[in-house]
Amino acid sequence: MADTTKKLTPIGSKPIDRGKFIRYSAAAVGGLLLSPRIVPGKALLQKRRGDQLNIALLGTGAQGQVLLNSCLKIPGIRITAVCDIWAAYNRRRVSRLLGKYKHDHRVYEDYREMLAAEKDLDGVIIATPDFWHEEHTVACLEAGLDVYCEKEMSNTLEGARHMAEVAKKTGRLLQIGHQRRSNPRYIHCYEKLIQDAGLLGRITTVNGQWNRSVQPDLGWPKKATIESAVLKKYGFANMRQFRNWRWYKGMGGGPIVDLGSHQIDIYSWFLGAQPVNVTAVGGTDYYEPATHEWYDNVQALYEYKTSQGTVRAFYQVITTNRNGGYYETFMGDQGTLEISESSSRSAIYREDSAPYWDGWVKKGYLKSPDEIETASAGVLDVRETLAPPAYSLPVEMNVPYHMPHLENFFAAIRGTAELNCPAEVGYETAVTVLKANEAVALGRKIAFKPAEFRI
Ligand SMILES: NC(=O)c1ccc[n+]([C@@H]2O[C@H](COP(=O)([O-])OP(=O)(O)OC[C@H]3O[C@@H](n4cnc5c(N)ncnc54)[C@H](O)[C@@H]3O)[C@@H](O)[C@H]2O)c1
């Protein structure tokens, strides 16, 4: 029989090891509990429609539309149900787009009605505000569906833990939307440069930032104002809060959670460890505190103890100036890796004392500065210049940022890949990031116990 693993495994996904797959399938027959990471796809256990997966989109706002645009490019994905409380705007827009792409679908306001009516779904993509993630995810998992839930997994640790527990109990897949985990550029940095080549040597310091310009509050077309009874039913005081939920306690987590969680997730991934403590300062110093309950800037310092020693990892998020944009920098005694989701941005610098990297360049792990310089200006050997030689990544990301992570989720449903960001990983990141807000509030260092990261 032909092995279809290769064909169905998208870039950035690890194919399931066949031996492992067979072993775990046998364990299922024996009645053993399966981890969500290795549950064979529902499609392999139940009826099949060829390769087609029927997916619901719950939450059709800015991010729901970004995810939908990727889904429309992925073969075999049909969006057959759409749920959103903003009927007159986001939901209408998405429904029109689906009509244009000939995705036959039904629309709902209340997710409970959707789950009661839709009996032919394989999975749900959840892109509602953070404070809805727990209820939406748990209900979908309990309805037997696999779930892709946007970050932040939840605005509370109890919520995130509950989601992970239900995923485990039901044996359904739960992918959390930290999309860099499926980005081939990040995977290359981790697997090839850090793990395999050990190019950076002993990593001692990490730096990262997301600096953003001042942004006005989000508005809405007045003719699309939602009735206040509907807003209240779904937990929103008014349209202003509905549009700017990220800034409110009890709804989102502010910029450190919204933006920082993506990058702090990479710290733990690349370091192969969870932090032992966090110190953080921040405040609502620029915006109006009555409508911006969360801190508009945070500077956090995490301490990690890795197998190589202590690592200090700084992270900053500000919302008043975009200087430098967003990136993460890993510094070791042999080199520095600067990486950003922004696809044009990466640089790898060799310390003078480190052995030359020509072997890694030949192996295809890096593009040498010589190649770059020669291509542009035909200048001297950069080793003779004073500027540090900037190597670059040989891997490009030519598809939308979220597409590989969605493809990984769909491959996992089909049973041909493991999730790149399963619930337990999303939970670890939620613990790491939500505690930074707590450290700001308490004004002191918070220690993490290893048990806190376990579900
Ligand atoms: N991975 C990323 O890079 C990324 C980027 C942006 C946002 N996000 C995440 O995506 C999620 C959505 O963010 P957004 O920017 O799209 O917000 P948004 O406010 O633009 O959209 C939220 C949508 O959810 C709908 N909604 C609210 N409550 C609902 C409910 N109870 N039932 C059904 N629909 C409901 C709203 O009507 C709106 O259309 C958040 O969790 C956010 O953190 C992730």
Image (cartoon, rainbow, N blue to C red):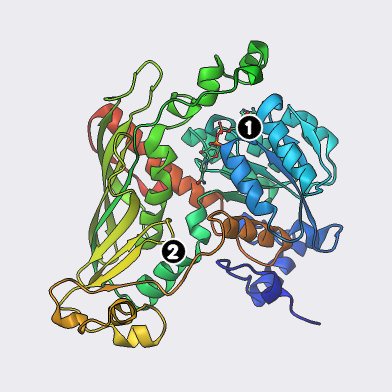
- Is 141 displayed left or right of 198 in the figure? right
Looking at numbered disc 1 in the image, what kind of residue is underneath it?
Answer: Glu
Residue 40 image offset from top left, x and y in percent = 71, 62
The verdict on label 1 being within 8 Å of ligand 1 is yes
- Does residue 165 lie above or below 357 as drawn? above
Looking at numbered disc 2 in the image, what kind of residue is underneath it?
Answer: Tyr
Observer-side mark, 2 or 1, equals: 2
Judging depth in this view, the residue of 24 and 64 nearest the camera is 64
Can residue 286 be seen in the rendering of this structure? Answer: yes
Tell me the number on the disc at residue 186: 2
Residue 368 image offset from top left, x and y in percent = 32, 80
Residue 29 image offset from top left, x and y in percent = 77, 63
Q: Secondary structure at mark 2?
A: helix
**Residue linked to disc 1:** 135
**Quadrant of the image occupied by residue 42:** bottom right
Judging depth in this view, the residue of 214 and 242 nearest the camera is 214
- Is 437 displayed left or right of 182 in the figure? left
Question: Which residue does the image show at 29% across and 58% down from the upper left?
Answer: 329
- Does residue 204 lie above or below 196 as drawn? above
Q: Residues within 10 Å of mark 2 (few under 14, many from 20)?
A: many
